[in-house]
Image (spheres, coloured by chain):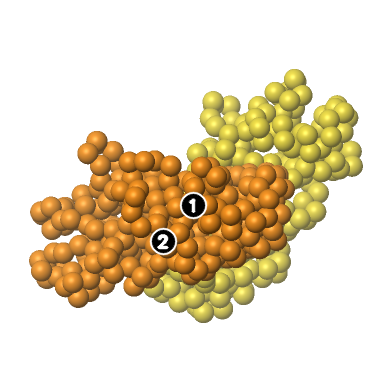
Chain colours: A yellow, B orange
Amino acid sequence: MKNYKITIEYDGTFFNGWQVQTKNLRTVQGEIQKALKIIFKRNVLLIGSGRTDKGVHALGQTAHFKAETQMPTDEILRALNANLPDDIAIVQIKKVSENFHAQYNAKSKTYRYTLLNRATPSPQARLFYFFYPYSLNLSLMKKEAKHLLGKHDFKSFQSKDPSRPERGKDTIRTILSLNIKKKKGFIIIDLTANGFLYKMARTIVGTLIDIGRGKLPSGTIKKLLKEKNRAQASPTAQAKGLCLLKVEY
Amino acid sequence: MKNYKITIEYDGTFFNGWQVQTKNLRTVQGEIQKALKIIFKRNVLLIGSGRTDKGVHALGQTAHFKAETQMPTDEILRALNANLPDDIAIVQIKKVSENFHAQYNAKSKTYRYTLLNRATPSPQARLFYFFYPYSLNLSLMKKEAKHLLGKHDFKSFQSKDPSRPERGKDTIRTILSLNIKKKKGFIIIDLTANGFLYKMARTIVGTLIDIGRGKLPSGTIKKLLKEKNRAQASPTAQAKGLCLLKVEY
């Protein structure tokens, strides 16, 4: 059996997230597995670096699958893209060692959150940002965000959903970098961490927005990290603004 | 009566072009006139800088309309956007002198044509490029494109459609700049001219692609400008790759 690592771009708008579900919902993993089945004439399990939620996008999601085949990799790439809907594309394929695992071997992930922070919407980018036309104190957001860097217990920033598997488990993660920049009306927040709790990126962004608009005082991030209480943080920011940029191994 | 100039962004995918048509088709002008009617409670004529074709996009289309109103301009802007579908937005509004005319006063226009020139498609940008995964000689395209600069008779690059009003009229235009650059797999062709014949931008791009892929020899542009025969030029490039960037006054 050969082992392949693929890098995937998708527009998450019309997907019920990454992961195949018991209900007959359209998912990214499901669509790629359908294409793999067409090419290899049998069921192929595709293992992603992790889930992305309903509506979340990716430019560099990664996954691996095993197949017994003589096809050259660029032929597999072409065949996969020819059998995928136009909101998913495999942008890279690589033969990797037998024991490479897209989830367990991931060292870090980078997510990008995009806000449109101007008076008017942008039709051409409308599926990929959260529209926030009100004033935001960007320098305060940047200052507060610095406290997130490093190794912390991110319990305050996990999902409120008690059924998620991380509940009761280790909620310690390390944020390796967090950059906020403004470009032509867009505020772009790039977050790199060794791992993310479910909804952690969007809860961090939601909290930073509340800080930027003056709803929460400076010192909030420090307090949340200390108190480890999800109820204190802000609502998660909209899924459509979030994009998985890359996964590092 | 007050006269207003507006700047419009749209995703042209789901429009039958700019101009209102006799048939009941969805057009950009039609949708904005509907919003104007809601706000001003009467029919308002919107005059664009020119038409864009079915499927062509805009980041900076311009238009003007007249209205008898006391509403501040940013309130008109907000009201318009609140009454427009999400694939159109008014990104700027300005009160202008009574005799400003969006079409007659336009000095130049800039169009951008976007090709994706890599092996794999890009789902997030899929509505905004022409996918050309084959090899292109970019330096040859740039060299040939230089011959388009300046004042020429562009008869060879006009539409083949004999019913268009320009037929038999003046086909002399001045191309003020033409830049071709490659960025992350995308080839971006920016064209500025004092005016464009119907389908001129897309016929130029189609011809440059045929030069880049070696179907037409170097010297083609010079020859086409001299021969003034549309039948010699290449097919027009796909509408979805074209975007009206700005109109200068």
Place residue A53 in its image quadrant: top right
Residue drawn at x 71%, y 66% as measured from the top left: A176
Residue type at numbered disc 1:
Lys
Q: What residue is shown with label 2?
A: B172
Residue name at image x 53 percent, y 56 percent: B226
CA separation in Å, label 2 and label 1: 11 Å
In the image, residue A71 sits, relative to residue B100, either above or below, namely above
Q: Which mark is residue A122?
A: none
Q: Chain of mark 2?
A: B
Where disc 2 sits, the SS reads: strand
Q: Is residue A10 above or below residue A154?
A: above
Residue A77 visible? The answer is: yes
Whether marks 2 and 1 lie on the same chain: yes
Give B149 or A103, whichever is nearer the viewer: B149
- The single residue placed furthest to the top in the displayed view is A41
Which chain does the numbered disc 1 sit on? B
Judging by the rendered image, the residue that carries numbered circle 1 is B228
User: In percent of the image, x 13 and y 52: which residue is there?
Assistant: B43
Residue B150 position within the rendered picture, expressed as x and y whole percent measured from the top left: 50, 68
Seen from the viewer's position, the closer of residues B90 and A148 is: B90
> SS of the residue at dot 1?
loop
Q: Would residue B38 appear left or right of A29 to someone viewing this image?
A: left
- Crowding near the residue tagged with mark 2, few <14, some 14–19, many ≥20 C-alpha atoms within 10 Å: some
Image position, residue A100 (x, y; %)? 85, 43
Number of numbered markers = 2
| B84 on left or right of A116 | left
Residue B205 lies, in percent from the top left, at 55, 52
Q: Quadrant of the C terminus of chain A?
A: bottom right
The amino acid at mark 2 is Ile
Q: Would you call the spot at circle 1 few (<14 residues within 10 Å), some (14-19), or many (20 or more)?
A: some
Q: Nearer the viewer, residue B180 or B160?
A: B160
Q: Is residue A113 visible?
A: no
